[in-house]
Amino acid sequence: MDKAPFKAPDFTQEFLQNAPNAILEPCPADGVAPENYHALSIYPEYFKVDGEWKLAVESRMDTVAVIDKNRDVQIIEFRNLKKDDLVVIGRTEDASEGIYMYTDGFDSALTASDKFAFRSGRSRETAFSKDYDDLYAIMREEKENDGHIVWVLGPSISHDDKSRNNLAALARGGYVNAFIAGNSTAVIDLSRGLVESEGKNTTTADDEFETVRRIRELGGIEKAVKDGNIQDGFMKAFVEEEVPYILAGSIRDRYNLEEVIDNVYEAQDKMRAHTRKATMLICLSSVLNTIASGNMTPSYNEMNGEIRRVYIYSVDLQEFSVNKLSDRGTLEVKTLVTNIHDFIEHVKTALVGTDA
């Protein structure tokens, strides 16, 4: 496990000392970036402002750099730009326009030929034992050091009662700090957890519709749990452990829980509130939510004045699914090609034991 501290650039280098200040242009209107705006990446980027190189903390994809009234760098989504915001202009990243992308901050354990090893892909034949050991160590460290572990899940985990309750045990053990999913993931878990469903096979579309109707009738997820109507599962654990959950709607949804956020921008904002402060992102069997969450998550973050790597894990049985996100680079994404029910069993057993 690479736990090397962040190594800042050597700003005494001539090309950095002689670089010009970044060019700033005001936005002509709300939500409209000036021409030739600089779009950020997942990597650390520095901007020269008033002769000083400043790091854009929380750099993430599909955003622009805005210099605020205190001359600090703010990372803003295009749609959140306001008229007269000062946006950094330029498409080069070699310091020639006061913009410097830095890819070596966490690479001390890698050789030059290793940096883009992710392009070879990973498969079912890959041995993942060391990856699991590293994962356990990272999760323990994040829990002990005020980390923020965000889980992104698809509905397949909800169809297996053991997996549902393994995730619940991890939440009770303090290894889930936020949860992102769609409507079906929560509905199927609640369907199987309803006291009145005990002993039934609650996996059909009709059962899901009835579950939504029933949870609405009971006053919503939180009230259904607190009134004793949900006997097990991860949604019950999230309510009882006060783990925030974000359920984002889809154009495919037909009948949603009241807690599902139907407005896409509102859902993005709720998700981003957790991905921005994430120190770890674990994505299981949910291609669309994984890509969305991964693109919102910085590859590094600042905590207590320290620049820390953000760890991202993408886990799925299909190589195609995990490798969709792996082209973000080796800086922070680790992929495992495996059954997610087995994955959650291994993680739960290693971190909270067999009796939890």
Image (tube, rainbow, N blue to C red):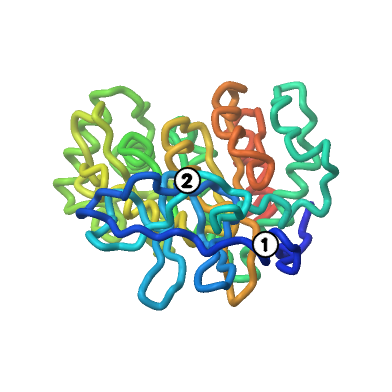
Vertical placement of residue 57 versus 354, above or below: below
Q: Is residue 163 visible?
A: yes
Please state, as top left, top right, bottom left or bottom right, where the C terminus lies in the image: bottom right
Q: Is residue 166 visible?
A: no
Q: Amino acid at mark 2?
A: Met
Q: Amino acid at mark 1?
A: Leu
Q: Position of residue 6 (x, y in %)?
A: 71, 63
Q: Position of residue 30 (x, y in %)?
A: 21, 54
Q: Quadrant of residue 144?
A: bottom right
Q: Is residue 134 left or right of residue 293?
A: right
**Residue at 22%, 59% in the rendered image:** 83
Q: CA distance from mark 2 to mark 1?
A: 24 Å
Q: Position of residue 174 (x, y in %)?
A: 55, 63
Residue 142 vs residue 197, the one in the foreground: 142
Residue 16, numbered circle: 1
Residue 165 vs residue 47, the one in the foreground: 47
Q: Quadrant of residue 308?
A: bottom right
Mark 1 nearby-residue class (10 Å; few <14, some 14–19, many ≥20): some
Where disc 1 sits, the SS reads: helix
**Residue at 61%, 34% in the rendered image:** 326
Which one is earlier in the sequence, the residue at label 2 or at label 1? 1
- Kindly check if marks 2 and 1 are in contact, taking CB atoms under 8 A apart as contact: no
According to the picture, the residue beneath numbered tag 2 turns out to be 61
Q: Is residue 173 left or right of residue 178?
A: right
Where disc 2 sits, the SS reads: loop
Q: Position of residue 58 (x, y in %)?
A: 51, 59
| Label tally | 2
- Residue at the extreme left of the image, as rendered: 217
Mark 2 nearby-residue class (10 Å; few <14, some 14–19, many ≥20): many
